Image (cartoon, rainbow, N blue to C red):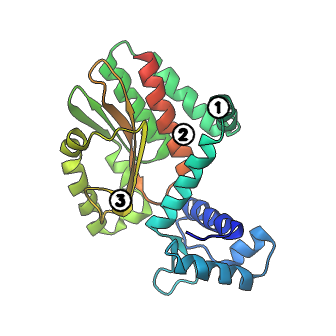
Amino acid sequence: MEITERQKQILCQIVEEYAETASPVGSVTMAKLFGVSPATVRAEMAKLEMLGLISQPHTSAGRVPTDAGYRFYVNNLEDNREMKDDVESSVEASSDMSLERGIHALVRRVSSQSQTDAAIRGAVDTLVDLTGNLGLATIGGQLYLSGISRLFTQPEFVDTRKVQAVARLLDNLEPWLREAAPGEPLNIFIGQENPIGRNSEVSLIISKFRSPFSDRSYIGVLGPTRQNYSRVMTLVRRTGNMLEEIL
């Protein structure tokens, strides 16, 4: 996919701005951030729209990322991470104080539990608190879910059809995990990429880890496609690694 550096920067900013505000992002906002004219930004947005990376909802003047736009953004995050070693990644994560506090809260909560299942539940509940998403984990062949009410407070789910689509996804999530057994340490399924609940407009971010229950245990979150991927991916990845080390 042919995309210029400035278009990449504008796309990433749209993803991050939309995650923060839940409102379509306009050219005036982008122009102020990049120090160029709104007309220049509109031209770049038009190219991003032609590439299928952003779209214009209804008659709004702003743009929102598409599933493809989110995938491009996430892949860019992963590519940048692979260019760093573990020490550099840890330093970068620690530069976000709220993220650092979140990771410390996870460690404290998991370390305080003497039972494996309680430790995993504690990790899931903390992920819910830190992300506002639904948290999930496999515990001894069962799927533990927490934070359903938190998920449905997100503005995307004022539409009951989306709530119903998420409910259908959750009904089928446990058998799908057993059958598909995603093999990467961090697995990210965005919107239409979800093998179940394709129209639910949610992203599933899960980490595989070894536990006393199974070599293929999973922990992660389910949230709207509009979310802070950098933060959530880091939290889920670090939680999986931490559980594997502690358990």
Question: Which residue type carries mark 3?
Answer: Glu
Question: Which residue type carries mark 1?
Answer: Ser
Instruction: Locate residue 60 relative to residue 216 in the image: left or right.
Output: right
| Marks 1 & 3, CB-CB < 8 Å contact | no
Of callouts 2 and 3, which one flags the residue occurring earlier in the amino acid sequence? 3
Residue hosting label 1 = 90
Residue hosting label 3 = 193
Residue hosting label 2 = 234
What whole-number distance in Å separates the C-alpha atoms at marks 2 and 3?
Answer: 20 Å
Residue 98 locus on image (x, y percent): 63, 39
Q: Quadrant of the C terminus?
A: top left
Of callouts 1 and 3, which one flags the residue occurring earlier in the amino acid sequence? 1
Residue under the point 43% across and 63% down: 155
Q: Is residue 165 above or below residue 78?
A: below
| Residue nearer the viewer, 30 or 159 | 30
Displayed quadrant of residue 58: bottom left
What whole-number distance in Å separates the C-alpha atoms at marks 1 and 2?
Answer: 10 Å
